[in-house]
Amino acid sequence: MINSTYYWNMNDEANKLRRKWYIDEYVPIDIFSIIKNKIPNLTMVFMDMGDKISGASSEFEGYTTIFLNSQQTYGRQRFSLAHEVYHLLIEEHSDKEEDKQVITCMNNSNEKIEKQADEFASCLLLPHNALKYYEEFNGIEKNEDWTIEKIIDAEQYFQISHHALMWRLRNLNIISYEFYQKYKSSPVKKARKMGYNTKLYESYTGKEETTDGMYIYLLNKLYDDDLISIEEKNRYLTDAFCD
């Protein structure tokens, strides 16, 4: 189990960033829209990264790139994006450009820094006080009130993956190990029966292999300034999955 004091420290770091971004700690966060606005010179790359990698990130000479696995669910991609935010904005880095490199994040890594990034991501998407307020507003007075239906309601509201919310509730000792094991698998059928759109649990088909952001802007600027030919521009666009 995660040390509760340390977990609260990660929650404080997440809320500190929310305040910096002028986002109330009690509300769901549209992480994709926020990141594009809050991180300058950002390029987002959605690509098939296989079964072992969830994402990656790098920052070099003022330009930032975040890679997300296009084959993972929308909920997982939201979590992975928040995870990469920790590596880019919270984790301590060397100031030397030559020491910077691409940070590759594996699924279910046991490395300490990866666990820290996971805890931060969980708290950024769903701060502790937001969870507490949600319980109060929805009449969840004791741990036993957290049924699978209530969990699906909560993850849909906060747009957090099923795995992330179950992991969070388990590590806060809100649900038992037996409950966690019984309901940890994807609840697509259950969510559908409850009337929810299942986008959260399915592959993010709106973002298959593609590239958004600064890379596209710079490429078009180079072409507009006659620094590259139309053939070069098209080749670079194709390299970035932009046919």
Image (spheres, helix red, strand yellow):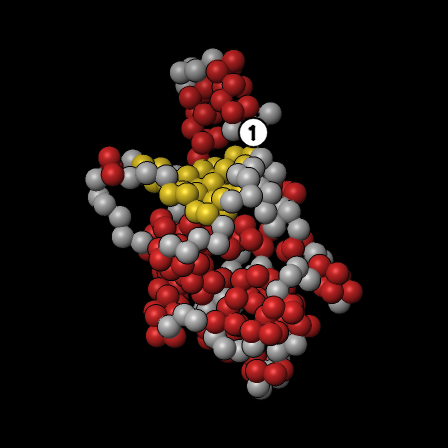
Task: Check the picture and name the quadrant holding the N terminus.
Answer: bottom left
Q: Is residue 87 visible?
A: yes
Q: Is residue 26 visible?
A: no
Q: Residue at x 38, y 54 (%)?
A: 111
Residue at the outermost right position: 193
Q: Residue at x 37, y 72 (%)?
A: 3
Q: Secondary structure at mark 1?
A: loop
Q: Residue at x 62, y 78 (%)?
A: 146
Q: Is residue 229 above or below residue 171?
A: above
Q: Residue type at mark 1? A: Phe
Foreground pick, 50 / 74? 50
| Crowding at mark 1 (Cα within 10 Å: few <14, some 14-19, many 20+) | some
Q: Residue at x 37, y 39 (%)?
A: 102
For disc 1, the marked residue is: 241
Percent across and percent down for residue 50 are 55, 39
Q: Quadrant of residue 165?
A: bottom right
Foreground pick, 145 / 222? 145
Q: Is residue 102 above or below residue 231?
A: below
Task: Check the picture and name the quadrant holding the C terminus.
Answer: top right
Foreground pick, 114 / 232? 114
Percent across and percent down for residue 162 are 60, 62
